[in-house]
Image: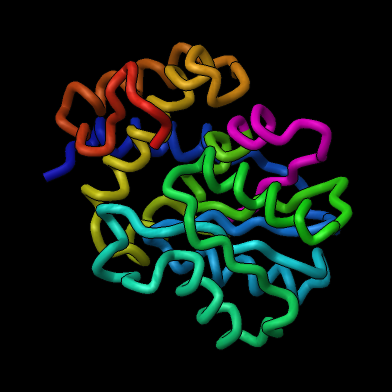
Amino acid sequence: MISAQAWADAQKLWDFQRMGHERRPCSVAVGLGSHDLGVADTTADLYHQGLFPLVVFTGATSRTTHERMPRGEAEHYRERAVELGVPEHAILVEPNARNTGDNIRFSHVMLEDRHVPVSSVLLVSKPYEERRSFATARKLWPGVEWVCASAPMTLPEYIDSIGDARLVLDMMVGAQQRLMIYPRQGFMIEQEIPNDIRGAFERLRDSGFTSRLAPETADQA
């Protein structure tokens, strides 16, 4: 049973992670691999809105996705986007990234190798990882403008779509922790974390939502 306090704290983290960027046309999109095919759905919708001509889906597999996405996150995203009407020629697949840093670095290299001019990137992620993704991208690929996007869903709607409240809250706590520890490890830009957000994170962590926490000195994951 998840307590009322935990739900309230989860809502705080959810709201903080949403960047609130106005969606606008960009040079390319990058769809970050994960367990959530909704990222591919959102990317397809944005493509049909004419916001970019080319997308890189990036991601190998993880402990969360190796069974449900055996061909790799990026490949499953590609298949979903094609089903939703995105043409094959508008999709690049980067199949090797195993963390957010890899997603950004490997996508950058892939586009450079193909001589794709990039001045702005529409960065599509899970809703509770917009800020984490933005902070990573700004650190590892400076010099371009980053516009964040994710599925326009409330926290309860998102949990219903995933079907596992505990997993979502664990992942949210892990994302928030990384925002606080990764800047000093060189993986992200520094961002101000308000005290009420720190408090919400600490209460959720202390309540046992810890399965996606990173060791304080670990490599990025």
Residue furthest to the front: 113
Please identify the quarter of the rendering in which residue 13 is found.
top left
205 lies above or below 7: above
Coordinates of residue 169 in the picture (x, y in percent): 29, 42
Q: Residue at x 50, y 12 (%)?
A: 184
Q: Nearer the viewer, residue 44 or 155?
A: 44
88 lies above or below 130: below
* Residue 142 on the magenta segment: yes
* Residue 4 on the magenta segment: no
Residue furthest to the left: 1
Find the magenta span and give its range. Answer: 135-150
> Which image quarter holds the C terminus?
top left
> Which image quarter holds the N terminus?
top left
Q: Residue at x 28, y 56 (%)?
A: 64
Coordinates of residue 102 in the picture (x, y in percent): 53, 43
Coordinates of residue 194 in the picture (x, y in percent): 51, 15
184 relative to 173 in the view: left or right = right
Q: Residue at x 71, y 68 (%)?
A: 46
Q: Nearer the viewer, residue 218 or 137?
A: 218
